[in-house]
Amino acid sequence: MSSIRFGRLLLPVFVLFTGFSLPAQSVLKTKYSNSTIYTGIEVGSKGVKMSVIEMGKNAKSSGAFHILKDTSINTDFISFTDPSFDATLNAFLSLYNKALKEYRIPSKRIFTVVSSGVKMQAEKDNKKEWVTRLIRSFNERTGETERQVEVVDVEKEAKLSHLGIVPASRRYSTFLIDIGSGNTKGGFFPFGNTEYFKLFQLNWGTKSTANATEKRLEEDASLPNYYKNLQRVLAGAENSEIIYAVNSSGAFPLSDNIAVSGGIAWAVATLTHPELADNPVVSVTFDEIRKFSEKLYNNYEALSAKYLSMNISRQSEKETAITEINRVHKVFDQRSIMAGTGLLLKIMRQFESAFDTKYFYLVKNGPVGWVSAYVDDAVNE
């Protein structure tokens, strides 16, 4: 059984794809016998992601799954420029063709979606036609004019994220927050059943926060000016959206566990606890993330793979940590990590209390959760 741990809590991750038998997939190194394999491709705010997952026998009930490939190509689609459009379309086609031709996965078992973060930013910027054009171009280039590329609604994405990430044993005491590139969404089940989901959402994500900051820099692109304007952007987001969104969600008195997923959760977990690089979930405190945020600005060099791995004694753990740290720095630059961490802190701050202990967890493989649950939902319709 594949599982991840919330501190002392054991968290089974139920990846709910339905696919085809794997024997012919010699190009992929599989873990189980008589397994099945599936692919989900998502066009997100920052780029295109592909998850290829193998599931063992009785995977739906046991949670036995294995991530074969987890690939992303950064394209910054929500900047809505011709170069970013072309880069996104090419990345979308490249990953689809890799799944279809290199991994030999039939097209009916490749699920393609556009994230809610893209949807929200396109609506905000009056750029919905860019999304329509991307889907049309993709379908034309693949020759699959009838293929559905769903633009996922934020509530559906948030609910599926919760169902895909949080186990039944912790489902009703956990508030899930997914910080994406273009937006933040999440929520919880307040009535002890999965019929009603209380949505939490913000029009702010790691990339959209960084973009809003960059627009304020004018002719001074220095790091101190970026930091100053980032604080202004975050203060505005906190006062105009974050405080209200958390308070109106009603999550504070009902949720003991605050689980945060998304790319920035993976990055922060990796850089704050490199010794736990193999752990899918890392427990953190508000004060710990606050100090990490300060280090991002004042001593970024101390977050290099060489420096962070110095105190890891076991060679295998050191090598894993170095690989993951370098992956983080390849995906995020200093300024984008500052933006994402700042947003994370503003949200965590609303759950800090001297009278009520909340447990914060950073979930590294969150994207697999919602995509997998989406595929299961689509298959069973």
Image: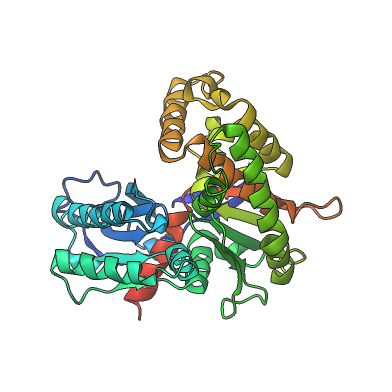
Q: Is residue 249 above or below residue 73?
A: below
Q: What sort of colour scheme is used for the picture?
A: rainbow
Labels in figure, total: 0
Q: Residue at x 77, y 65 (%)?
A: 253
Q: Is residue 48 above or below residue 221?
A: below
Q: Is residue 168 above or below residue 334?
A: below
Is residue 219 in sight in this rendering? yes
| Residue 135 shown left or right of residue 236 in the figure | left
**Looking at this rendering, what residue extends furthest in the right direction?**
355
**Looking at this rendering, what residue extends furthest in the front direction?**
219
Q: Residue at x 35, y 75 (%)?
A: 378
Q: Nearer the viewer, residue 340 or 84?
A: 84
Q: Nearer the viewer, residue 59 or 152?
A: 152
Question: In the rendered image, which quarter is residue 198 located in?
Answer: bottom right
Is residue 55 in sight in this rendering? no
| Residue 293 shown left or right of residue 33 in the figure | right
Rendering coords of residue 193 (x, y %): 61, 77
Rendering coords of residue 360 (x, y %): 66, 49
Q: Is residue 217 above or below residue 115?
A: above
Rendering coords of residue 321 (x, y %): 47, 29
Q: Residue at x 48, y 57 (%)?
A: 13
Q: Nearer the viewer, residue 262 or 300?
A: 300
Rendering coords of residue 189 (x, y %): 62, 72
Q: The C terminus lies in which quarter of the figure?
A: bottom left
